[in-house]
Image (spheres, helix red, strand yellow):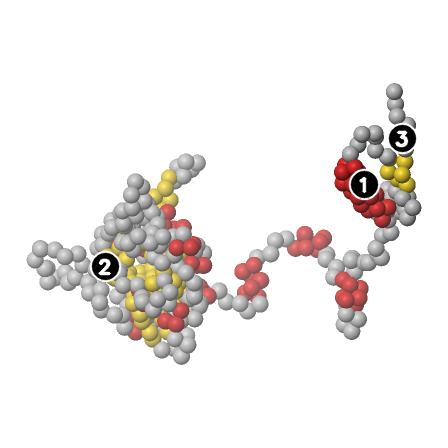
């Protein structure tokens, strides 16, 4: 047997409620009816599915000049930009370097090559790179530019177009070429850092690194490269010398060729890398939040300043008698202006 529905209708709106069945508690009614009333009122205020929704006033976004005038009537309107895709396709690809040169831009690396002459008594060992060796005095020279002077560091120096965003100097030579140059002047390579099963610091002969440059007034300046590296947020500079770790080679399984891993950027490092050519013989993280060194900004010249690095192997102590015909290199002997001559205009 079915029960006939009985309806209660609100006098202030069109809401109708069914009366509760017999036996329904008063508490159920008191809790249920206010909820039903709230839902029904909300539905009355919302437009029905069949009711048309008025669209916002149409605005033209295809005409930049109209949009500009509507946003600020005081500004003069300009004709819309038209792109000639057909002409662009016929013109072919654009050479960025040629375009920059036409605008008068000069590559800072070209500026280095045009400004600095070869160091006297040294032999260039690469036609493409600005790299020399002085076998008699056990010295390696590398030209480059200041690439960064105010940031945390992973490297002191890297090859150009690798890791300039975290290195003070970008050099016009590959790490593998500098490795060969150090061997040519008698330096002994060791082993890169290892992390498993436990940390083992990089080894190798210690290398002193000097920097030469000219300031804004053209005056010759030099500095121990360690003085450009700050320890954390302190006023203390890097104190230890780099060691000739020697990086590693990687064989590409696709082409079978060997690649010197330090060419990817790890030339003279302040964070530990298993691919470093020169590394620090201490534990130094390469994690962004745990970098231990930063650029000593106030000691570094402006970015793009041409520089010349001088690498000198530090003699290894030996009990053998000294051969007077083969004088040992003096890493503490600072470079002089004669080692950074300028090209004649």
Residue at (31%, 41%) from the top-left corner?
A: 196
Marks 3, 2: nearer the viewer: 3
Using the rendered view, name the quadrant where residue 138 is placed.
bottom left
Residue at far left of view: 321
246 to the left or right of 165 = left
In whole angstroms, how far apart are the C-alphas of marks 1 and 2?
92 Å
The image shows residue 202, relative to residue 311, as above or below, that is: above
Earlier sequence position, callout 3 versus callout 2:
3
For mark 3, give the secondary structure.
loop
293 to the left or right of 75 = left
Using the rendered view, name the quadrant where residue 73 is placed.
bottom right
Residue 64 in percent (x, y) is at 76, 62
For mark 2, give the secondary structure.
strand
Earlier sequence position, callout 1 versus callout 2:
1
Residue 44 in percent (x, y) is at 86, 46
The image shows residue 16, relative to residue 247, as above or below, that is: above
Q: Quadrant of the N terminus?
A: top right
* Residue 65 can be seen, yes or no: no
Which labelled disc corresponds to residue 313? 2
According to the picture, the residue beneath numbered tag 3 turns out to be 5
Residue at (41%, 60%) from the top-left corner?
A: 152
Which labelled disc corresponds to residue 33? 1
């Amino acid at each position: 047997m079915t029960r006939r529905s009985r309806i209660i209708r609100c006098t202030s709106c069109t809401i109708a409620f069914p009366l509760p069945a017999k036996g329904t508690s008063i508490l159920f009614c008191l809790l249920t009816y206010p909820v039903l009333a709230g839902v029904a009122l909300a539905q009355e205020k919302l437009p029905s599915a069949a009711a048309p929704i008025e669209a916002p006033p149409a605005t033209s976004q295809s005409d930049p000049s109209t949009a500009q005038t509507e946003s600020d009537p005081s500004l003069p309107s300009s004709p819309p930009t038209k792109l000639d895709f057909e002409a662009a396709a016929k013109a072919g690809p654009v050479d960025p370097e040629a375009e920059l040169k036409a605008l008068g831009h000069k590559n800072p690396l070209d500026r280095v090559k045009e400004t600095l002459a070869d160091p006297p008594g040294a032999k260039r060992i690469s036609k493409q790179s600005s790299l020399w060796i002085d076998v008699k005095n056990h010295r390696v020279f590398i030209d480059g530019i200041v690439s960064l002077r105010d940031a945390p560091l992973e490297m002191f120096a890297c090859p150009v177009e690798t890791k300039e965003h975290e290195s003070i100097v970008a050099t016009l030579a590959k790490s593998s070429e500098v490795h060969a140059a150090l061997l040519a002047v008698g330096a002994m390579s060791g082993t890169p850092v290892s992390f498993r099963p436990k940390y083992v610091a990089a080894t190798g002969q210690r290398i002193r690194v000097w920097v030469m440059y000219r300031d804004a007034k053209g005056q010759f300046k030099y500095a121990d490269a360690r003085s450009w590296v700050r320890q954390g947020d302190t006023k203390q500079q890097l104190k230890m010398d780099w060691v000739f770790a020697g990086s590693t080679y990687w064989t590409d399984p696709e082409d079978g060729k060997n690649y010197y891993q330090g060419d990817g950027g790890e030339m003279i490092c302040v964070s530990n890398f298993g691919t470093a050519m020169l590394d620090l013989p201490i534990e130094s993280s390469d994690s962004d939040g745990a970098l231990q060194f930063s650029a000593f900004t106030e000691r570094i010249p402006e970015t793009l300043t041409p520089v010349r690095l001088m690498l000198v192997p530090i003699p290894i102590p030996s009990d053998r008698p000294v051969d007077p015909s083969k004088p040992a290199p003096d890493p503490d002997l600072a470079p002089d202006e004669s080692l950074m001559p300028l090209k004649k205009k």
